[in-house]
């Protein structure tokens, strides 16, 4: 079953979302993300799936380009090295990996200008350029939210109920933003 953090929904059965990303999920490039750890207790694939799903939901709710949001979310960390042992060439990992992810995504898939902006600027304000689209500002928020949720989920599994309140609060905050009209 393909599911995002804090969700029990099988994403392969959520047609509106899955139809946006199924070609990416079937690719060898995205499959390679399973090989790399990302945040503590999470693979880069799972993190990217989490960002993709919640980015899709939030952009759909705001009547923005949810399809591009889902695709950019899945591709925003498309780099194939262990970030802890990788030596950055010119910039910090926070800046450099976004450029590498966009390069890799562009080699493997057709990338729209909007998707490219979301991928290259998802680490804003740590990146030098201001996002050009509302969807890009949203992915910066969703990426950080998912990173926090992943760490909290890991801590909850490791320590028990102490972190569960924080995880549930974070989930309710995001769900409140998505479900309000």
Image (tube, rainbow, N blue to C red):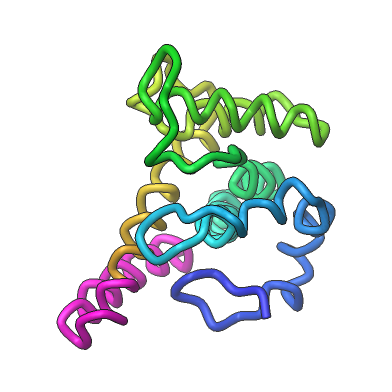
Observer-nearest residue: 148 or 86?
86
Q: Residue at x 60, y 56 (%)?
A: 35
Judge whether residue 96 can be spotted in this image. yes
Judge whether residue 22 is colored magenta: no
From the image, give the main secondary structure of the stretch colored magenta.
Answer: helix
**Does the magenta run of residues contain 165?**
yes
Give the residue displayed 28% in from the left and 68% down from the top: 152
Q: In what quadrant of the picture does the N terminus appear?
A: bottom right
Residue at 55% x, 62% y: name it.
Answer: 46
Q: Residue at x 43, y 48 (%)?
A: 143
Query: Residue 128 lies in what quarter of the image?
Result: top left
Q: Is residue 51 visible?
A: no
The location of residue 86, given as percent across then percent down, is 44, 32
State the image coordinates of residue 159 (x, y, percent, origin top left).
20, 82
* 162 is higher (above) or lower (below) than 126: below
Q: Residue furthest bottom?
A: 161
In this rendering, position of residue 159 left or right of residue 172: left
Above or below, 101 against 18 in this view is above
Residue projecting furthest to the left: 162
Magenta residues, start to end: 153-181
Task: Report x, y in % for residue 2.
Answer: 66, 74
* Residue 20 position (above or below residue 161): above
Q: Seen in the image, is 86 located left or right of residue 71? A: left
Q: Residue 24 at what x, y percent from top left?
A: 78, 51
How many numbered discs, if any? 0
| Nearer the observer, 86 or 45 | 86
Residue 35 lies left or right of residue 87; in this view the side is: right
- Whether residue 153 is situated above or below residue 130 in the rendered picture: below
């Amino acid at each position: 079953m393909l599911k995002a953090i804090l969700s029990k929904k099988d994403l392969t059965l959520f047609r509106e979302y899955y139809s946006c990303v199924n070609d990416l999920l079937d690719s060898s490039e995205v499959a390679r993300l399973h090989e790399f750890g990302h945040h503590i207790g999470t693979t880069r694939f799972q993190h990217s799936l989490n960002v993709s799903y919640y980015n899709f939901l939030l952009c759909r709710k705001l009547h923005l380009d949810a399809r591009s949001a889902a695709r950019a979310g899945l591709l925003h960390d498309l780099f194939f090295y262990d970030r802890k042992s990788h030596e950055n060439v010119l910039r910090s990992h926070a800046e450099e990996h976004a450029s590498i992810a966009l390069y890799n995504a562009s080699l493997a898939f057709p990338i729209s200008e909007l998707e490219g902006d979301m991928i290259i600027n998802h680490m804003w304000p740590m990146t030098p350029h201001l996002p050009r689209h509302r969807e890009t500002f949203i992915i910066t928020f969703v990426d950080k939210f998912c990173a926090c949720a992943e760490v909290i989920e890991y801590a909850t599994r490791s320590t028990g109920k102490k972190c569960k309140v924080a995880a549930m609060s974070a989930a309710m905050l995001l769900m409140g933003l998505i479900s309000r009209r």
